[in-house]
Image (spheres, rainbow, N blue to C red):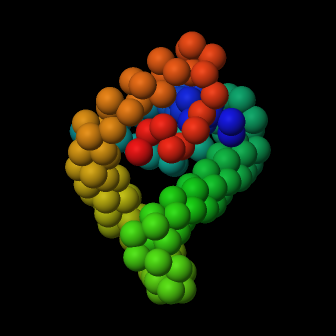
Amino acid sequence: VKHPVDQAVLGIMGVFVDTFIVLNITVFVVLSTDVVAFENGKAVFSGISLVQEAFGSQILGRSGGYGFVAICLFFFAFTTILGWYYFAEINVRYLLGAKFVKLLQILVVAFVFIGSVQKIDLVWGLADMFNGLMVIPNLIAIILLSPVVVRLLSDFNDGKSYDANDYK
């Protein structure tokens, strides 16, 4: 991009579409069907099976709903793995050098394989924990880089072109 603010806007839109639009559609589909049920105080369906049942019960038919959600989940998981790998590789190259990228690739393949053969509750628990831990370096970066962000946004709004040397 010509200016970092352009990339930031694109990132914000991605988060908005994913967390607000897609997740709300999913919630409305689940709430508009009669699949939320309890037996002996426990939910009959939960997690992804609840979403599959909701899409299958009213909208796409049983096989269509299950297939649609499975395909969506596959693409979500696949693109998430690719996206997080890309971020990791960029950071490994910057912090440790290109010679450590091969080690990262081996670790990623190993963890993807291990995660694919583990119980789903363990995998989701670990994913939640590591995503939660990512808050720490992100908050530190946000605090330390906030003056740069304010300056970049001001320059962008004033129509100034971006030169990385101006922000060192």
Measuring 67% from the left and 48% from the top, which residue is drawn there? 72
Q: Is residue 124 left or right of residue 51?
A: left
Along the line of sight, the residue nearer the viewer: 28 or 75: 75
Query: Residue 52's image quarter?
Result: top right
Residue at position x 40%, y 76% from top? 96
Q: For the C terminus, give its image quadrant.
A: top left
Q: Position of residue 43 (x, y in %)?
A: 35, 41
Observer able to see residue 70: no
Query: At which x and y percent is residue 16?
Result: 54, 26
> Which corner quadrant holds the N terminus?
top right
Vertical placement of residue 131 versus 151, above or below: below
Question: Quick check: 48 left or right of 52?
Answer: left
**Residue farthest along the top direction in this orientation:** 158
Q: How many marks?
A: 0
Q: Is residue 116 above or below residue 143?
A: below
Name the one closer to the observer, 79 or 13: 13
Camera-nearest residue between 117 and 16: 16
Q: Residue furthest front?
A: 165
Question: What x and y, as percent, mark residue 41?
Answer: 24, 39
